[in-house]
Amino acid sequence: MKEYKLTTPVSESEARGLKLGDVVYVSGHIFTSRDMAHLKYKALLESGDPLPKDFAGAAIFHAGPVCLKQPDGSWKLQLIGPTTSIRMEPYAEMVGKMGAKLIIGKGGMGDDTLAACAKYGYVYLQAAPGCAAKLAQGVKAVKDVTYFELGMPEALWDLEVENFGPLVVGMDSEGNSVYHSLKKAAIEKMEKDYPL
């Protein structure tokens, strides 16, 4: 296990160099995106319209931040924690085509994401659940917000970050998934300890 400090945009070679269990800290920009934002991207790509951000080398965080609007109209982030990532599984191929290299969330993703990680050279990073205040310390500013009409959690927030983490590689570009390994080990133990 190694520790990496990456700055967005992240190159494909940097992402492919990350292995299961490596610890990652991210600086630069992180884009939050949940279910509704992914649906927006899909519709834009299908219609040939431009995406709201350049996702080449980007870090996409499955999260719904809590932000407060300031008197000058700017936003200040208060808390940010990961949301369950498996809901975004249908967009694995699309995210790869968009060029994102770091997907951040909790709970892992499925086989389609694992295949897309290998094909496009991106990785899935586990953010610690229940550490929203700690993770918020790595966010230096809210650059802007898109799709606010969807509601605060579902909007696309462009966050300027510095040493955001720690994040752990849960799925790499070589077909390895800690979530698959844990599931397999759990099933084997259950079958051994509780045979039918």
Image: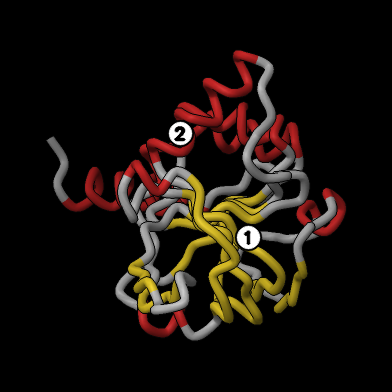
Circle 1 — which element?
loop
User: In the depicted view, which residue is nearer to us: 139 or 62?
Assistant: 139
**Where is the C terminus found, in terms of image quarters?**
top left
* Number of marks present in the image shown: 2
Residue at screen point 65% across, 34% down: 51
Residue 159 in the image: above or below residue 38: below
Q: Position of residue 81 (x, y in %)?
A: 37, 67
Residue 40 in the image: above or below residue 15: above
Q: Is residue 167 left or right of residue 123?
A: left
Residue at numbered disc 2: 89
Q: Is residue 12 left or right of residue 192?
A: right
Q: Residue furthest top?
A: 47
Residue at screen point 39% across, 70% down: 80
Residue 3 in the image: above or below residue 170: below
Numbered tag placed on residue 20 in the rendering: 1
Q: Quadrant of residue 153?
A: bottom left
**Badge 2: few (under 14), some or many (20 or more) residues near its Cα, within 10 Å?**
some
Q: Position of residue 130 (x, y in %)?
A: 30, 74
Numbered tag placed on residue 167 in the rendering: none
